[in-house]
Amino acid sequence: MERTGDKLFEKALEYPATLDTVPKIKATTPLIITFDSQTVNDTSLVLDQALVSFQHVDTKNEVALPARAVKSTESYKMDVSRKNFRLHFSSAPGVYNVALVLGSFKQGGLFYDLGNVEMVAPKGTKEKKHEVAYGPKPEIHHRFAEPQKMPNILVSLFFTGLVVVPFIGLLGGWAYLGVNADKLQMEPVGSVVFMGLIAAYITLAISYWIGVKLFPTLTYALVLALPTYLTGQYALSKRIEKRI
Amino acid sequence: MSAVLSALVHDYAAHTPLRLRAIDAYMAFCAVIALVQLVYCVLVGSFPYNAFLAGFGSAAACFVFAAALRIKSDERNAHQFSGSPEGAFAEFVFCHIVLHFIVANFLG
């Protein structure tokens, strides 16, 4: 019975030897390939590319997994973990040709065919079909967003009226208190022009809301700014003078 | 409780100048407008949310500007502020102009 940590198969190869058997690799028995590279002078060679290629002998589909450098031993290690096995081989079991694809900018490249291994699918997994069907995809039927549910129009109109009522109440309250515009006569022309320019600003804000674009609105606001400031300054300073 | 309220109302009517009472009426108006919009949002829902925020924010901001105008217009606070009530009114107008452009942009 297999136990965790048991080595089921171990083979050491020296280039250009290949495997003489086809070992079976299951999802529960991770495949580990370690290798090192040396120059002709027997010095350790740092690789710029170290991949392990698995090519299915029947479908020719290829999976290339990178090998990471292990600095302590100056070697490279590739580990087909359970996650990688599930991702790449569970749905496409079968015999794979294993090869090292090595590259060095200084020394060139090497394709080292190691031999074949058999990837055994776990029980219960469905095999993916390897045929690729070319043709039109199913038609997409666009679903437009459904409009938001809005309240009854009477409710909206009621609350619109409810918002207007306090304004009437405000005017009535001011009338009750005796608020009036008599002191505008202190400076009638300046005050009227000032109030008119304020009304022009409010009209500009409303027109911006209705449809006028931002930059024309800002231009008009800029044009109104100086006269508003000057008339406001004039009207209010005259009022201060007459008050004092 | 009712005695306290009636004393408050009497004192308010007797000692509060007309200008401040007019501003108080405007502040009450802004508060009621904000409340009506809030009740509508709670009852019916917040869609469109930007419109609710623009309306409610506008009423709340008007209330705040009116409060600042009231503070600066009160003669009892004259020693704390260097400007005049007319200057406070000018600031009030400027703030409202900027506010209404922001609200118009946010209304959508």
Image (cartoon, coloured by chain):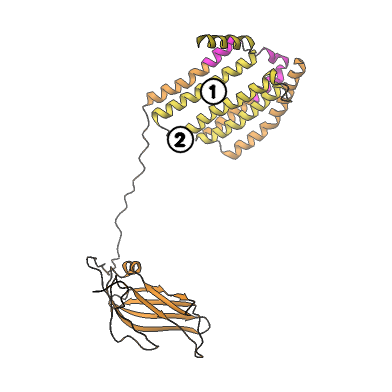
Chain colours: A orange, B yellow
The residue that mark 2 highlights is: B49
Q: Which residues are magenta?
A: A169-197
Q: Chain of mark 1?
A: B
> Is residue A192 within the magenta segment?
yes
Does residue B86 lie above or below A64 as drawn?
A: above
Q: Is residue B20 left or right of residue B31?
A: right
Instruction: Please state which of residues A38 and A189 is positioned toward the viewer in this rendering.
Output: A38
Q: Secondary structure at mark 1?
A: helix
| Residue A101 highlighted magenta (yes or no) | no
Q: Which residue occupies 39% across, 24% down?
A: A155
Quick one: label 2, few (<14), some, or many (20+) residues within 10 Å?
Answer: few
The residue lying at 32 percent from left, 85 percent from top is A19
Q: Nearer the viewer, residue A84 or A10?
A: A10
Asked which secondary structure carries label 2, the reply is helix
Which residue in the protein does label 1 denote? Answer: B30
Q: Position of residue B94 (x, y in %)?
A: 65, 29
Q: Earlier in the sequence, mark 1 or mark 2?
A: 1
Chain identifier of the residue bearing label 2 in the image:
B
- Is residue A28 toward the left or the right of residue A207 in the image? left
Magenta segment's dominant SS is helix
Q: Are marks 1 and 2 on the same chain?
A: yes
What is the x, y in percent for residue A64? 39, 74
Residue A165 in picture, x, y percent from top left:
48, 17
| Mark 1 residue type | Cys
Q: How many marks?
A: 2
Q: Is residue A190 left or right of residue A122?
A: right
Q: Amino acid at mark 2?
A: Tyr
Q: CA distance from mark 1 to mark 2?
A: 20 Å
Residue A201 figure quarter: top right
Q: Residue at x 50, y 89 (%)?
A: A42
> At x 29% / y 63%, what residue is drawn?
A135
